[in-house]
Image: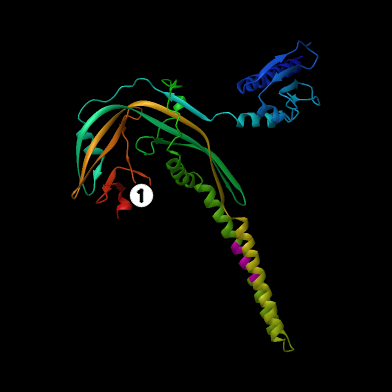
Amino acid sequence: MTNLIEQGSIEQDVCDFATKLLERRGGLVEWTDHNDDAAREGTAIVPTEIADLFDADSETVQLSTQPGSKGWCLSLATDFLDTASQLLELEPRVGTFCIPEMYLKRGDFEELVSREFSWLNARVRLQETRPVRVEYHTWWFHALFVSEDRWETRFPITVNASSGTEVQMPNPLDLWELEPHPTACRQPPTTYKRAVLQAQRQVQELAGKFLARMDGRLGRDRRRLREYYNALLRENHQKKSRSQTKPDPEQQEARERAVKLEMRRKATELDERYAMDLTLEPVVLTRMEIPALAIDLSVERKRARRKHTVYWNPLLKQLESICCTRCGSGTFSVAFTNEEVDPLCARCAE
């Protein structure tokens, strides 16, 4: 009895999931009455691009929980999940949210800025502090390293859309203050390149143990390869010294060349087997708009002057770094170029 109840429950869940998925893609689903022992059957009227996934001749797709039936079979014993994943691929992967109100710090920001930042080669003065609304883009990346073994993970990169600085923000979807923001700006995000740059750096750190392990394996196999073929070369010389008859020098050299050639070929195969192939793919983007404080700074470098803005983040309750215009890293030790007065981190300024 328990197995029948569980089976019926799973079947109902699958049908409910398929119904919601089709309706979300613009379909209209209708189920026929059925007995408890009979397979569920229904009909879905769907847009043309959805009907093409089922190779349907029209916009009508038959639904059934009975394997082997026509149309879309809603059973985990079939390719149901593969088809569902194709439908999910059509889903938008961008969520827009906001936090309407947050407490913004008051007080002496000039002292706070001077304490947090080191200005390496310019004179910096605080001009104005003003409340603003800032959008933060949290890009979720899927990273996959493929070599003799494979490693994968998923991780977020959050970028301040106004300053371009990476910020170590909490997961937006974990914030209880978060609300949907359907009226948010729909223009394509400009933070993608910056997020990819930071993701490429971070994935090297995240995969550090895996990369070290692969380097260790490669070094071990190279050592074994050299030991094996060097042993063959030594054996060839030993045969030459023990031989009572004078060996043919050309044959000896030919055997030695053949061994060395085979060793190089095997070494090349080894390098190809351990070559690293990295795939870094954006999966989801969360756009979150929150209140923040913009702190406008007047920067004087020699005879040039320019305004720069840093932000006080109410979620982190701290100032955010300035983005280096050369390498893209966030920094609190800032130098500036002579004419454009572009910010640089200490390493790029050297």
Q: Is residue 224 magenta?
A: yes
Describe residue 310's horizontal placement relative to residue 70 as left or right: left
Q: Quadrant of residue 266?
A: bottom right
User: Relative to residue 16, is residue 145 drawn left or right?
Assistant: left
Count of numbered marks: 1
Which corner quadrant holds the N terminus? top right
- Start and end of the magenta stretch? 222-229
- 312 or 337, which is in the foreground? 337
Q: Position of residue 149 (x, y in %)?
A: 61, 49
Compare residues 276 and 98 and report the one nearer the observer: 98
Q: Quadrant of residue 135?
A: top left
Q: Give x and y (percent) for residue 285.
A: 49, 32
Q: Is residue 10 visible?
A: no
Label 1 secondary element: loop
Report the front residue among 17 and 260: 17
- Vertical placement of residue 275 versus 139, above or below: below
Is residue 13 highlighted in magenta?
no
x and y, in percent, of residue 350 in the image: 30, 55
Question: Against 136, is 219 above or below?
Answer: below
Q: Which residue is mark 1?
A: 326
> Which picture quadrant has residue 295?
top left
- Name the residue type under label 1: Arg
- Position of residue 85 in the picture relative to residue 134 (left or right): right
Name the residue: 23% across, 37% down: 297
